[in-house]
Image: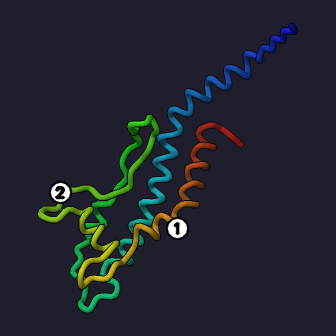
Amino acid sequence: MAKVKIEMPDEFLNQIADMGNALDVAIPKALAAGGKVVMEKMKSNLQAAIGRGTKYKSRSAGKLAAALGVSPAKLDRVGNLDVKVGFSEGRGEVSNAMLANVLEYGKHGQPPKPFLKQTKSSSRKPCIEAMQTVLKEELDIP
């Protein structure tokens, strides 16, 4: 039986090892850049949805939009890194998440004003592009 032994150049193997170390730093930065793009789009969609199509002037104080933020990159249960774009809590009787849900889907006597669905569809491409740009910069890929 024939036997073939192929050895990779040491320089190439060192580049691959260095890239692995650089990925550990670059991936959280890329996720943060993508999260920022989504958050900005969500904030603009939210502000456009608040007070739209109402009988009376909006009484919004901007607390819901101010509570919007991006979490730092963390490992999930499966071992994947992710960031979350959402609302911080601490509003009082009614949570920010509940208010966002009522705004998105409506309730009896209040029509829905979707902003999350629009955010998901309109920010997908810019988010991916922002993450790719950061990865290329961090890993020195032309």
- The x and y percentages for residue 1 are 86, 7
Amino acid found under the numbered disc labelled 1? Ser
Q: Identify the mark at residue 90; answer none if there is no mark.
A: 2
- The x and y percentages for residue 114 are 39, 74
Please tell me how many numbered marks the rendered image carries.
2
The tag earlier along the polypeptide, 2 or 1, is 2
**What residue do we see at 34% from left, 88% from top?**
53
Quarter of the picture containing the C terminus is top right
Amino acid found under the numbered disc labelled 2? Gly
**What residue do we see at 29% from left, 67% from top?**
100
Q: Do the residues labelled 2 and 1 touch (CB within 8 Å)?
A: no
- The x and y percentages for residue 77 are 38, 37
Instruction: Give the Cα distance between marks 2 and 1.
Output: 29 Å
Location of mark 1 (residue): 122
Estimate how packed mark 1 is, as few (under 14), some (14 to 19) or many (20 or more) residues with alpha carbons within 10 Å. Answer: some
Rendered position, 74 above or below 41: above
Q: Kindly state the secondary structure of the residue where label 1 is placed.
A: helix
Q: Is residue 55 left or right of residue 138?
A: left
Judged from this view, the residue extending furthest toward the front is 1
